[in-house]
Image (cartoon, rainbow, N blue to C red):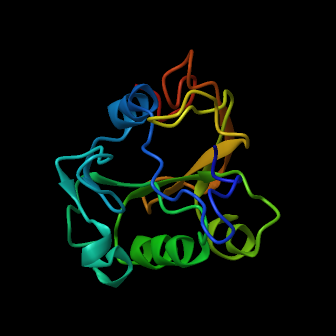
């Protein structure tokens, strides 16, 4: 079962937990204190916003202006999340959003392209609780006034994020 295979006619899984090894590599480069769309079982940060708190209605920029915010949104409808990231970036938030690499989608064109640093992941992710890799390529979009929009490819299994760049540590 994967996100593109319905469990029944009207449902797909929307609570994929970010792989810990992957998150740790991102977190090493961009320290995160909040998980913006999580639950107690799949959160990656001590602080998190769950579905009952309606993350899309919560102001993100004031949560932790010095650190980064992590977002692995439900993949069924990414558009409102991408738009929210762009708006919160304008208010000073620093957000890393994990999504399928859906470069032909409207949300990518309007809220991500030339607005965020797009990091295409070389190496498929196997989400927590799954035995097979997710069937689509993924990317992270980095929304921040501290980092210029652009595009890069990252072999997350081998290299630290930003290796060989001015942002590399």
In front of the other: 97 or 160:
97
* Left or right: 124 as drawn, with respect to 81: right
> Is 147 positioned to the left or the right of 20 in the image?
right
126 relative position to 100: left or right: left
**What is the tally of numbered marks visible in this picture?**
0
In-image side of 110 versus 65 (left or right): right
Residue at 36% of width from left, 41% of height from top? 30
Q: Residue furthest left?
A: 46
32 up-or-down from 102: above or below: above
Q: Is residue 1 above or below residue 80?
A: above
Between 76 and 100, the residue placed more toward the observer is: 76
Q: Quadrant of residue 80?
A: bottom right
- Can residue 60 be seen here? The reply is no
Q: Farthest residue toward the top?
A: 158
Outermost residue to the bottom: 57
Furthest-front residue in view? 8
Can you give x and y, in whole percent of width and height, for residue 75 in the image?
58, 61
Q: Residue at x 25, y 76 (%)?
A: 53
Residue displayed at 74% across by 71% down = 109
Q: Quadrant of the C terminus?
A: top left
State the image coordinates of residue 22 (x, y, percent, origin top left).
46, 30
Name the image quarter holding the N terminus: top right
Judge whether 10 appears above or below 145 on screen.
below
Residue displayed at 37% across by 59% down: 94
Residue 118 in the image: x percent, y percent? Answer: 63, 50
Q: Is residue 117 visible?
A: yes
* Viewer-closest of 110 and 49: 49
Relative depth, front residue between 133 and 68: 133
- Residue 95, position as x, y percentages in the image: 41, 58
């Amino acid at each position: 079962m994967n996100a593109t295979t319905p469990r029944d006619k009207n449902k797909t899984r929307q609570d994929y937990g970010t792989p810990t090894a992957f998150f740790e590599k991102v977190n090493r480069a961009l320290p995160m204190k909040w998980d913006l769309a999580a639950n107690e079982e799949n959160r990656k940060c001590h602080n998190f916003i769950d579905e009952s708190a309606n993350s899309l209605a919560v102001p993100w920029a004031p949560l932790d202006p010095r650190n980064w915010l992590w977002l692995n949104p439900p993949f069924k409808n990414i558009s409102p999340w991408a738009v929210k990231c762009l708006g919160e970036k304008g208010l000073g938030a620093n957000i890393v959003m994990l999504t399928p690499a859906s470069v032909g989608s409207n949300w990518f064109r309007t809220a991500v392209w030339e607005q965020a640093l797009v990091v295409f992941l070389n190496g498929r992710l196997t989400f927590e609780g799954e035995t097979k890799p997710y069937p689509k390529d993924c990317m992270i979009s980095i929304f921040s006034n501290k980092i210029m929009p652009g595009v890069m490819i990252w072999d997350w299994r081998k290299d630290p994020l930003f290796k060989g760049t001015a942002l590399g540590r």
